Amino acid sequence: MSDFSQEFIQHLINGISLGSIYALIALGYTMVYGILQLINFAHSEVYMVGAFAAYYTARWIPKFTGHELPPGAMTLVILLCASMFVCSVLGVTIERFAYRPLRKAPKLNILITAIGVSLFLQYAGQIVFGADPKVFPNVMNDAVIMNFGTAELRLLDVTILGVALFFMAVLTYMIQYTKTGKAMRAVSTNWTVASLMGINVDRIISITFIIGSSLAGVGAVLVGMKYPKIEPLMGTLIGIKAFVAAVFGGIGNLGGAVLGGIILGLCEEMVVAYISSTYRDAFAFGLLILILIFRPAGLLGRPTQEKV
């Protein structure tokens, strides 16, 4: 195997790992949009709060129990549960008090509110958590599982991909085969008809925010494992990139969000490897512009017509 092939495999592994994180966060954007036709810009700050929830859980448990959390699967499960719980509570709170009162208002009002909630959480995070970056706890001891010459398949990357795929599979099963999932699909198609069929629309929307926010919490822990530095503004850039992934795949389409996240992660990694890390972020924004120009519905999205 040539040096180029080994290097390419390593970048492929890194890109898939990063893309799976983008996909998890993008699912939150696309779920809310599919139900409410709303871009929830506060989703990136929910992700940020999830990272701090896991961070403080790892710090507080030893104080109350007298035992340190050793790196391993149990620690990962504990931090995932803590992050998902806090994110789901925050997500449903935002929906109940910020978005629900404006549900019948013009979409521009709701969009401005979403931006306002995002900014509020950013500055509140700096006040509550402090503006200085913090080091995320060691969740799992990394190790090399397999070598491809100089390329390495590491335990951390396999864990990130495995956790991401697990939650994506659970979400797919829930949407396709459960009563709640069928109700969510009905509400996303037509609120009025769904309510006439006996579906509690408010309850389904709340569940959608809980699920989407929980996935953001999972993504926050995985990012903390891979890039162990967190701070109150950490959600801004990765949130925009996850939004780009959702639009690229087809906003409102779950499969499109996953596909868009994986492709974006792979493309970013290849740009860093073979062009320059300077253009890493510029690529994401350039991709968004191209998609909006040439295929506004995204790769798997379907063009829709609105009556004026």
Image (tube, helix red, strand yellow):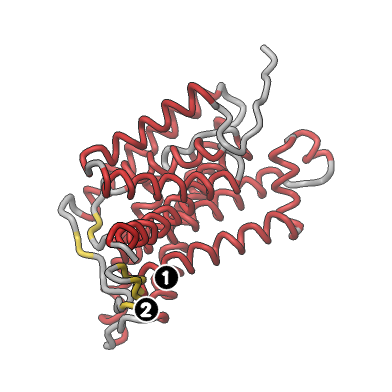
Q: Within 10 Å of the Cα at label 2, are there few (<14), some (14-19), or many (20+) other Cα atoms?
A: few
- Measured from the top left, where is residue 291 in percent x and y? 48, 29
Using the rendered view, name the quadrant where residue 288 is placed. Answer: top left
What numbered label is drawn on residue 73?
A: none
Q: Is residue 198 above or below residue 84?
A: above
- Measured from the top left, where is residue 127 in percent x and y? 22, 49
Q: For the image shown, how many numbered marks are present on the structure?
A: 2
Residue of label 2: 145
- Measured from the top left, where is residue 22 in percent x and y? 43, 50
Residue of label 1: 158
Q: Residue at x 37, y 77 (%)?
A: 146
Residue depth check, mark 1 versus mark 2: number of the one nearer the observer: 2
- 226 vs 264, nearest the viewer: 264
- In this view, the residue farthest toward the left is 132
- In this view, the residue farthest toward the bottom is 66
Q: Residue at x 33, y 36 (%)?
A: 283
Left or right of 24? Residue 14 is left
CA separation, marks 1 and 2?
9 Å
Q: Within 10 Å of the Cα at label 1, are there few (<14), some (14-19), or many (20+) other Cα atoms?
A: some
Q: Residue at x 34, y 59 (%)?
A: 5
Q: Earlier in the sequence, mark 1 or mark 2?
A: 2
Mark 1 and mark 2 in contact? Answer it, CB < 8 Å. Answer: yes
- In this view, the residue farthest toward the right is 197
- 100 vs 166, nearest the viewer: 166
At mark 2, the secondary structure is: strand
